[in-house]
Amino acid sequence: MINSGLHEQQAVCSVRNVHHHYGEHQALRGVDLDIRPGRVFALLGPNGSGKTTLFRLLSTLLPIQQGQILIGGFDSARQPLSVREQIGIVFQAPSLDMKLTVDENIACQGALYGIHGTELRQRRDALLEQLDLLDRRGDRCQVLSGGLKRRVELAKGMLHHPRLLLLDEPSTGLDPSARLKLWDAIQEMAGQGIAVLLTTHLLEEADKADEIAIMSQGKLIAEGAPSDLRAEMGEGVITIVANDPARAESILQKALGLTPQRLHHQIRLKVESPEKMVPVLVETLGDEVQSINLGRPSLEDVFITRTGEAFNT
């Protein structure tokens, strides 16, 4: 486990008032966030929310149009080479040479950073042991499973001891078992004091992070620990399907003083005592009700409450 003092350290990455556009399309609209050492930070959002653009800016693959990004104390706009020394990157698209072995792929990565000889061997062996790849080091990458390939990508990204590890949709294409092993590796790296930022559109994956930032239409709409964001929703969320949603919504407002939220044909309520509320709703709405579902708050509920829209990936 990490030392709790790490949480109070200065942010490894600070993003301030970042805007980015593609022609007339505003991809980012004033984003601010801090990523601290020893934490797994997830950028959660549906396709088109802006998380990929932000990832590319953090990776120095796009120029800063407006705002500032500092990584390891270096300004991405003025010191991109210094920033690249601070970051390790695992892209969604594979970057392995499938004809080379695991060892050879890592050695090629080392050459890019001037790491060779004894230093290379020591770092490579430590990472292979940490990621449970020692027995596969002589295998060509083309014969590895998707999960093993991801772990080799992690080893490449960690070889130069970055302060910030960037992962773009790291679980894409992995089966549940491989996904769990990958997360074990990610959390172990954070436990060593590394700041980890990952993008994801998977709600269950974001729920494993220490902190998340939920994005929609280029803005951060919620930020914090997953448990804290769910707690803001109250004890439960009630979803009502009614014959006439507009009429049912009006009844709830006038008869019970509630503030329901309409999502397509559904009516949603966040309440403190959901078990007590259900019989009241049944009595009040009567034949207007088709079904009433009761559930604990989820990150999807947070997204729907903040945006009024479904979380469509």
Image (cartoon, rainbow, N blue to C red):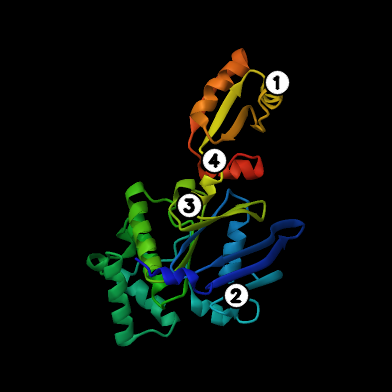
Q: Nearer the viewer, mark 2 or mark 4?
A: 4
Q: CA distance from mark 1 to mark 2?
A: 52 Å
User: Residue 89: x, y in percent?
Assistant: 48, 68
Q: Nearer the viewer, mark 3 or mark 1?
A: 1
User: Residue 245: x, y in percent?
Assistant: 66, 23
Q: CA distance from mark 2 to mark 4?
A: 36 Å
User: What type is the residue that disc 4 sits on?
Assistant: Gly
Q: Nearer the viewer, mark 3 or mark 4?
A: 4
Q: Which residue is mark 2?
A: 70
Q: CA distance from mark 3 to mark 4?
A: 20 Å
Quadrant for residue 109, please give it.
Answer: bottom left
Q: Which residue is mark 4?
A: 234
Sequence-first tag of 3 and 1: 3
Q: Which residue is mark 1?
A: 247
Q: Which residue is mark 3?
A: 206
Residue drawn 39% across the image and 51% down it: 174
Q: Residues within 10 Å of mark 1 (few under 14, many from 20)?
A: few
User: What type is the residue that disc 1 sits on?
Assistant: Arg
User: What type is the residue that disc 3 sits on?
Assistant: Ala
Q: Is residue 304 left or right of residue 180?
A: right
Numbered circle sitting on residue 36:
none
Residue drawn 58% across the image and 80% down it: 74
User: What type is the residue that disc 2 sits on?
Assistant: Leu
| Residue nearer the viewer, 114 or 313 | 313
Is residue 71 among what the camera can see?
Answer: yes
Sequence-first tag of 2 and 4: 2
User: Residue 306: x, y in percent?
Assistant: 64, 45
Sequence-first tag of 3 and 2: 2
Q: Is residue 109 left or right of residue 129?
A: right
